[in-house]
Amino acid sequence: MSLASLEFHERSVPLGALACAELGGLGGKVEQVSRKDVNPKDPPKLVVKADGTRFEGAATCLRYFARAGSKKSQLFLDGHPVEGTQIDQWIDWSVVLKPGQGLPELLKQINAFVSTRTYLVGGVLTLADVAIWGTLASMPLWVNKLKKDKSLVGLVKWYDTCSAIPEFAKVLSEQSKPKKSAASADGKKADTGGSFEIKLTGAVKGKVVTRFPPEPSGYLHIGHAKACLLNQYFAQHYEGKLLLRFDDTNPSKEKDEFVENILQDLKSLGIEADQTSYTSDHFPQLLDLAEKMIKKGFLYADDTPVEKMREERMEGINSVRRDRSVEENLKIFKEMQDGTEEGQKHCIRVKLDMQNLNKALRDPVCFRCNLTPHHRTGTTYKVYPTYDFACPFVDSFEGVTHALRTNEYKDREDQFQWILKLQREVLPKLPKVNIWEFSRLNMVNTVMSKRKLQWFVDTGKVSSWTDPRFPTVQGLLRRGLTVPALRDFILQQGASKNTTNQSWDKIWTLNKKLVDPVCARHTAVISEKMVPVELVNGPAEPQVETVLRHKKNPATGKKSMTKLNRILIDYADAKVLSKGEEVTFMSWGNCFIEDIKVNGAGEITGLVGKLNPGGDFKTTKLKLTWLADIQDNVNVRLVYYDHLITKKKIEEGDNFEDLVNTKSKVETMAIADGNCRNLQKSEIIQFERKGYFIVDEPYMKESKPIVLNYIPDGRTKGK
């Protein structure tokens, strides 16, 4: 359920308040109501859903989200009264920062203040920065004109630094997308905005209940993420509830490990369910329901061999056990519950229609014996309901109003309703459940089936369910995909029912736009055949300089850079150089190549160069990365991943095992600047001219290299 609704005119978006909500982890809990029928000068209005409390004004909304979110102490600098008062003063300034005669002077004052600072108060991002940034970002005069004023370079630099923060960037990105206005006061318009412009049948505001029912037999993958975000979207849109229910009806496949990791993945995605349950919570009711349905003649016990049962269902032939007496069916069902030898030979089927053209209605199985201990109930039960039987009952029993399912299960929609109808004849108080379909998310060169993914794990073709080649949430995060990019990509898919195969390039392009402005820059040189360069006029002793980790984003901090008369470059770069050529060594300057040394095999073994301090980098064709040849350099292992499947779309009849890419992982050793010893696990950086990388294994000791995974950028293919 959403925390609050925020209403504003579509041309007066309170960007600061929205950015504050994102910073505090509340972005998915704020319902944005963009209107056309209100005065653009009216302040934004916020309604707290829990008790209906109302607030007005951008600054007030800003303070509320800061207090309600997870970063309250940082944003207010709790415990620091002087800095806290300074933050209040800046928030007051944000209110009077409006177009008019006094605006230029105010901007000049702020510019002078921030020119020597990264953030406004205390050297860290606080509510002061959020307030001023939000006001400027919402001001067309600033965005379109004043931001280009060269006298405000300090303010522009500060503004760009804030805009590059992922949560701020996300707010700007979302507001730049075309949107439809929300319902007007007279009710003439009722568009929801975004890409989910579809109404749920029978949906009533405040009463919609959706559910996400993962089976704990694997980790969540990108397809599950779409299903969950879609359920969350409709629950929030209709001010209803989202239920999380683990469908744990098959003890042979389920583990606590999967439950724990699914919960972890949902937390990573910013999804918080209003209620969490397990199908196994309802096992007693399901067994009791089955007994009642047997007595009504709706279910029967069948010991037909599996292959013959499959043939009969295909041909529409009734089982010889279909007309067993109620007494015999009850007796066998008791044997099944006890796990006896006789009981284990049987299953329980529901009588539907063996001649129906929809084969999902041809007496599906609804209970099976399984003696494997259950991950929650242990050995309490010997017989378990199938998903097809349990799902309609539990959905109805838990109050689900709308069951969202991918359209691959279209044939099972009738089955769901038929089974629920029989269950309601036994338990009349069970409410009906609406089913709404959406398209399954398919990605090129990718398998989503948990059975097939498990095969990759079991055969050792991947390291685990978190392998960066896997489409699992954790695998994608290890490969460098950010959660905002993942959410944006999925939400862009919308609620369409058209099934398509999506390209991975789209998601990696989104990701690059988010990471490029904020990730630090470092340098790496490939170890194999790296070439030393002797600079005849370079410094004989190491000269250490302190420089920004990202020239355009001071917030990334600083790093050391060493200059020396002996440097190292990639062999690939050395191969394209010519004697006498002038090149640029990035972050240093121009250099003339005076000599190229080769061995008997024609391989380059060294270069001699002369620095040209007055050279213009604009005149050189080649801009090369380099490292001083010093012991402070650190060993790194660069890991490049490719698709696990060689074929874009697996067709019916294809054996996916024949399509496995045997060269989906390539490792390259390199040396990197010593600053990389400080990199943290999962930190994203850019090795200049090599691409973006995420730290998989940070520095531990000299004998163990840092491991970094290459992050695709949507243009180049990961090796």
Image: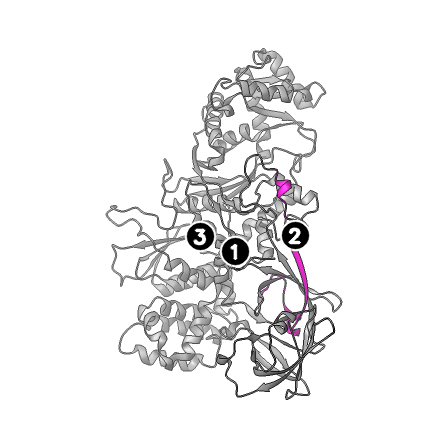
| Residue 698 shows in the view | yes
Task: Report x, y in % for residue 645.
Answer: 60, 46
| Residue 350 shows in the view | no
Disc 1 to disc 3: CB gap under 8 Å = no
* Residue 483's disc number: 1
Identify the residue shown where x is 36% and y is 62%. Answer: 14
- Element carrying mark 2: loop
Q: Is residue 670 magenta?
A: yes
Task: Report x, y in % for residue 220.
Answer: 57, 46
Rendered view: 74 above or below 360: below
CA distance for labels 2 and 3:
43 Å
Three-letter amino acid code at the position of disc 1: Val
Q: Residues within 10 Å of mark 3 (few under 14, many from 20)?
A: many
Q: Residues within 10 Å of mark 1 (few under 14, many from 20)?
A: some
Rendered view: 181 above or below 409: below
Task: Report x, y in % for residue 175.
Answer: 37, 59
For marks 1 and 3, the one nearer the N-term is 3
Q: Which residues are magenta?
A: 655-684
Three-letter amino acid code at the position of disc 2: Lys
Q: Which residue is mark 2?
A: 663
* Residue 29's disc number: 3
Identify the residue shown where x is 39% and y is 48%. Answer: 195
Q: Is residue 81 magenta?
A: no
Three-letter amino acid code at the position of disc 3: Lys
For marks 2 and 1, the one nearer the N-term is 1
Identify the residue shown where x is 52% and y is 88%. Answer: 614
CA distance for labels 1 and 3:
16 Å
Task: Point out the image quarter for the C terminus.
Answer: bottom right
CA distance for labels 2 and 1:
28 Å
Identify the residue shown where x is 59% and y is 74%. Answer: 625
Task: Report x, y in % for residue 184.
Answer: 26, 50
